[in-house]
Image: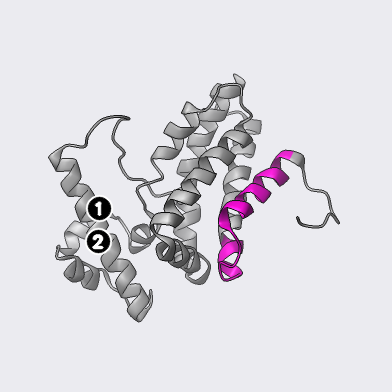
Amino acid sequence: MTAARTTASAPGSRPGLRERKKLKTRIAIREATYRLIEEQGYEATTVEQIAEAAEVSASTVFRYFPTKEDIVLTDEYDPLLEQELRARPADEPIVESLRHVLRRAVNLGFTEEPEVSRLRTRLMIEVPAVRSRLLESMSVTGRMLCRVIAERTGRDAGDLEVRVFAMGLIAALTETAAYWAEHDHRDDLGELVDRSLTMLAAGFAPGREAP
């Protein structure tokens, strides 16, 4: 549920050798970063240390990730979001399409990398630079949602209503992740996402008790 982008293969295709090597390098850099952050903290972890731990050069790290924050925020699931949304029925409400896709993404990401999911969201609320980079990069996801919403509704992707709705969804998901981290990851993240999307679809009723 993060915004930094990686390159996804076309559906049904097998990545070539070059792409597999790139993926292996990205994963090695990220795993080294997570390990170092857990051992010594975010601020104390340098790109030079990450490069040494991943057995690559610092320039290679920057070639894959423009900033240290991008290493934390990037994953291999984000590029599939648009693909999954476009695969949903064209007449399905966009909020319901998102509910289906995000529930699957949350389950996949948390099942495969639960500690990484917790670490990334914790850094999002604890490290201003990570939070700032997240908000900056989420505009990419917002533009993607604008395109999908425009196609579903027959409107222009640049329409005010389309942009407001798309960025409202992005803000809701960002705050959901922050809430999850602020409450020590005690809640089920999928259920929190469901609550947020339900509120967006139904509207906010002041005084209503949370489910």
Q: Which mark is residue 64?
A: 1
Up-down: is 161 above or below 184? above
Q: Which mark is residue 9?
A: none
Q: Which residue is mark 2?
A: 29
Reading the chain from its start, which is encountered first: label 1 or label 2? 2
Q: Amino acid at mark 2?
A: Ile
Q: With 77 as the anchor, is 53 left or right in this view? A: left
Residue 43, horizontal then vertical, whole percent? 37, 76
Magenta region's main secondary structure? Answer: helix
Question: Is residue 159 at least partly visible in the picture?
Answer: yes
Up-down: is 101 above or below 136? above
- Residue at 17% across / 70% down in the picture? 52
Q: In front here: 106 or 61?
A: 106
Camera-side mark, 1 or 2:
2
Asked whether residue 183 is drawn in magenta, I would say yes
Q: Quadrant location of residue 83?
A: top left
Callout 2 crowding tier (Cα within 10 Å): few <14, some 14–19, many ≥20: many
- Residue at 33% across / 68% down in the picture? 34
Residue 94, horizontal then vertical, whole percent? 60, 32
Residue 91, horizontal then vertical, whole percent? 61, 21
Q: With 108 as the anchor, is 26 left or right in this view? A: left
- Residue at 52% across / 44% down in the picture? 102
Residue 97, horizontal then vertical, whole percent? 57, 34
Q: Are marks 1 and 2 in contact (CB under 8 Å)?
A: yes
Magenta stretch, residue numbers: 178-201
